[in-house]
Image (cartoon, rainbow, N blue to C red):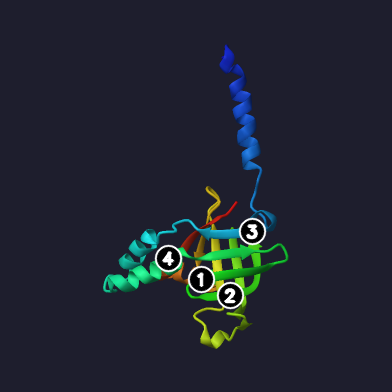
Amino acid sequence: MSIRGPGRRAAPVALLLLVVGCSSEMSEQTLTGKWGAVDKTGIGPAFKIKSGHPDAKGSEILAASKLLAATSLELKSDGVFSLNYGVNKFDGSWKFDKEAAMVDLTVAKMNGEVADVNKMLTAGYLGVMDRDDGTMRFYPIDRKGYEEAKRRGEKGPEAISVRLRKES
């Protein structure tokens, strides 16, 4: 079967764009930069929180969802990160597991002081990359806790997660 007419060149060009578009894989280099919450209003997180905690007060849900919507993360090329999550600022190191498409963050400082893991909700955070749209689902839990929660079918980490998008 042959293709005739002006559309004949469109097929090779479309194929080239598809191949070139797919060749940009995720790596430490492509993840480096500033990330911000996709939903800046907090409405999406509010619904997730309410579904996970139906007895929570509306004012508490709204406050929590606004804090989640203000989440920002900077992944630096030297393997260091800076995170604003909730009312706190965290700094530490990060690494990317390309096979699992996960970003592991290990906290070293909280609000400018050496982090005391005994006084923190978690000493690590996890970003799970969406290979389709390039966003990161950010969880306030370390990888081990995330995998255990998934295995048990728990929805808790999902309710307080935030979808982040790399800023231009």
Compare marks 3 and 1 and give the one earlier in the sequence.
3
Q: What residue did someone put label 3 on?
A: 33
Q: Which amino acid does label 3 sit on?
A: Gly
Please determine whether, in this image, residue 6 is positioned above or below residue 22.
Answer: above
Residue at image mark 2: 90
Counting other residues with Cα less than 10 Å from the Cα at mark 3, is it few (<14), some (14-19), or many (20 or more)? some
Residue 35 quadrant:
bottom right
Q: Where is residue 132 in the image (x, y as percent from the top left)?
A: 53, 47
Q: Residues within 10 Å of mark 4 (few under 14, many from 20)?
A: some
Q: What x and y, as percent, mark residue 37?
A: 49, 60
Query: What's the amino acid at mark 4?
Result: Glu
Query: Which residue sits at x=73%, y=66%?
Result: 78
Can you say whether 165 is above or below 122 in the image? Answer: above
Are dots 2 and 1 in contact, CB under 8 Å?
Answer: yes
Q: Which mark is residue 85?
A: 1
> In the rendered structure, which amino acid carries the disc numbered 1?
Tyr
As rendered, which of 35 and 21 lies closer to the eye? 35
Residue pictured at 65% horizontal, 49% vertical: 25
Under circle 1, the secondary element is strand
Q: Callout 2, which amino acid?
A: Phe
Tell me whether the residue at label 3 lies in contact with that at label 1, contact meaning CB atoms closer than 8 angstroms. no
CA neighbours of label 2 inside 10 A, class few (<14), some (14 to 19), many (20+): many
Q: Residue 158 carries which label?
A: 4
Give x and y (percent) for residue 27.
67, 55
Task: Please indicate, yes or no, whether residue 82 appears anywhere in the rendered image.
Answer: yes
Q: Distance between the residues labelled 1 and 4?
A: 15 Å
SS state under label 3: strand
